Amino acid sequence: GDSVTQMEGPVTLSEEAFLTINCTYTATGYPSLFWYVQYPGEGLQLLLKATKADDKGSNKGFEATYRKETTSFHLEKGSVQVSDSAVYFCALKGWTGRRALTFGSGTRLQVQP
Amino acid sequence: GAVVSQHPSWVICKSGTSVKIECRSLDFQATTMFWYRQFPKQSLMLMATSNEGSKATYEQGVEKDKFLINHASLTLSTLTVTSAHPEDSSFYICSARPGLAGEYEQYFGPGTRLTVT
């Protein structure tokens, strides 16, 4: 079945550092890929998405490119801020008709001033 | 943006009792709601999908008689954990999908932490 693997955290960075959170997936066909963010005390929010190979999703300075050849969707940001501290989840929606998402285990990011 | 609330945010109950968790879409109508369960440092695992006015569809391995789901209106779904045991202690998260939205729109509640003693 479908699965998502993302790097374990916590990831601790200083403000303005470069961020990469790795995400790889296993799925049949052509899944859609997502990054969700969960700020303390809040629900998961969609950060960005990509629906086909080579698509780049971007939002709030974050980017991720759908790489089918490496089955990856790594999240990157050039300069993180303290306000980016949160838990980040990589997820996929399979190619079959199922509308639910398959999630990775989440990566906690801590940005220090 | 669309908001989904969950109540309670945390609950402690004794083994053998039942607990009801509510999931509400506050500013939109949700034809579909999903219930997930999350163990510490693990993925969100889909438990069931509920559609308003019909029976929930449970994932393989999830006991439908233990985890009762009711989606009685377009803004409310409830998850009842019956005869709870310590192994049911977990973080339960719901999400709601607007009826007329694009395929990717799914809004998440903040979660409910259940501790069974």
Image: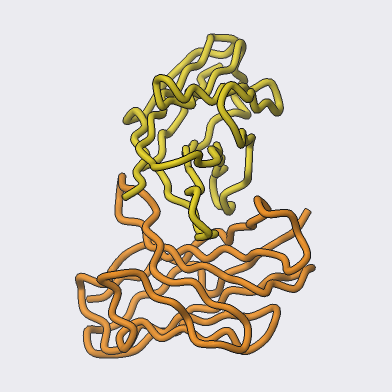
Chain colours: A yellow, B orange
- Determine whether B31 is above or below B18 in the image: above
- Total marks shown come to 0
- Residue A91 lies left or right of residue B95; in this view the side is left
Rendered image quadrant of residue B27: bottom right
Looking at this view, name the residue that lies furthest to the front.
A29
Residue positioned 48% across, 43% down in the render: A92
Q: Residue at x 71, y 61 (%)?
A: B3
Viewer-proximal residue among B10 and B18 = B18
Corner quadrant of residue A12: top left
Which residue is painted at 58% across and 61% down in the image?
B109
Quadrant where the C terminus of chain B sits is bottom left
- Above or below residue B42? Residue B82 is below
Q: Residue B24: where, in percent of width, then height?
A: 64, 74
Question: Horizontal and vertical percent for residue B9?
Answer: 50, 67
Say which quarter of the image contains residue B85. bottom left
**Residue A87: x and y, percent?**
48, 38
Where does residue B73 sit, x and y in percent of width and height?
Answer: 67, 86
| Residue at the image position 30 percent from the left and 50 percent from the top | B40
- The answer to whether residue B109 is left or right of residue A73 is right
Image vertical order of residue A35 relative to residue B58, above or below? above
Say if B59 sits above or below A79 in the image. Answer: below
